[in-house]
Image (spheres, rainbow, N blue to C red):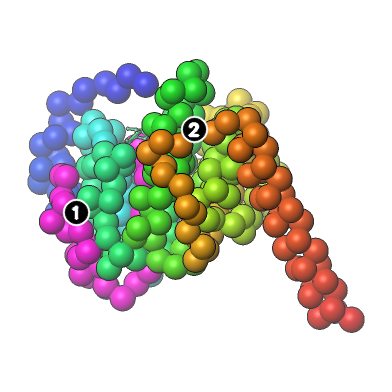
Amino acid sequence: MHIRTKKWARSELAACPFYEPEGEERKGRWREAFARPQQPLHLEMGCGKGVSTAEMAAANPEVNYVAVDISPDVLGDTRRNLVRAGGEGIDNIWILRADICLIDRYFGPEDGPERIYISFCNPWTERPKQAKRRLTHPRQLMQYRTFLRPGGEIWFKTDDETLFADSRAYFALCGFEEAYRTEDLAGSGFTPNYLSEHEIKYRAMGVPIRFGIFRMTEAAPDFDPTRFRLTPGVRRAALEKADRAWAARSAETERTEGGAEA
Ligand SMILES: C[S@@+](CC[C@H](N)C(=O)[O-])C[C@H]1O[C@@H](n2cnc3c(N)ncnc32)[C@H](O)[C@@H]1O
């Protein structure tokens, strides 16, 4: 994706009191960077221009957010969108410029975020070798595991069917269970849902949006994510495992809810 250079973005970000350029020294101390450190901490990976981030942060002052992206040019827009939605005094969000491939340099277990959002990351479906760059690849999920709070969640959205199915397999292999899943977010009625720049675009085109909530379990997987490749056999087995677990949980929910009504 080509990103246009914006002359104004760097100077505006440099003057922004909630912008952190490559701040490795905040690792383990993110909560104290906020006016209300006791609040839940949610991270967004690849926030882009922050269209949904701005709405979400303004609507939820009782949550602290860190919005991460690698490009200062898009982060200039993020800053403007945040100020437009929440005012100059917005105090529940930090913008972090960082390469998410190295995200465990920036967050540690002491930060313990309760939630991570990943929306419309690049699907990297053209060549199998590129898959390792996906923000949901096991290389990434195993890094998120190092700092996500036990039971923490990853909320993942995409328009790309292949990326969604591959990612479901990645999540299953990396010790995340499916807490929620839909192949059509708009039709599902799921709330709350804040629309990002890409979601607005795909909705207008009538493209169904896939969405899942993946909850980290205590069971850590026993493979090396740096050497991992998703072979068809591993993919099939992982998806079957996720489908079985999903069916079992749905049956259990139906049984307990039916029992509660009886
Ligand atoms: C397709 S855009 C999606 C933006 C937004 N989440 C949305 O839904 O509209 C993907 C974003 O992820 C960022 N990104 C991709 N790889 C990254 C990486 N390794 N580290 C940080 N940001 C990354 C890009 O700069 C871009 O802004």
Residue 48 shown in magenta: yes
Count of number-bearing discs: 2
Question: Mark 1: few, some, or many residues within 10 Å (few <14, many ≥20)?
Answer: some
Q: Which residue is mark 1?
A: 18
Of the image marks 2 and 1, the number of the one nearer the N terminus: 1
Question: Residue 106: x, y in percent?
Answer: 23, 52
Give the amino acid type for the residue marked by disc 1 in the picture: Phe
Placement of the C terminus among the 4 image quadrants:
bottom right
* Residue that appears at 54% across and 55% down: 176
Q: Could you tell whether 201 is left or right of 105 in the image? A: right
Residue 61 shown in magenta: no
User: Can you tell which mark lies on residue 229?
Assistant: 2
Q: Is mark 1 within 8 Å of ligand 1?
A: no
The boundaries of the magenta stretch are 21-49
Residue 121 appears anywhere in the view:
no
**Element assignment for label 2:** loop
How far apart marks 2 and 1 lie (CA) works out to 38 Å
* Residue that appears at 15% across and 50% down: 23
Question: Residue 184 lies in what quarter of the image?
Answer: top right
The front one of 39 and 76 is 39
Placement of the N terminus among the 4 image quadrants:
top left
**Residue 156 against residue 35 in the figure, above or below:** above
**Residue 143 against residue 262 in the figure, above or below:** above
Question: Residue 91: x, y in percent?
Answer: 25, 62
The front one of 227 and 40 is 227
Question: Mark 2: few, some, or many residues within 10 Å (few <14, many ≥20)?
Answer: some
* Residue that appears at 21% across and 22% down: 5
Question: Residue 207 lies in what quarter of the image?
Answer: top right
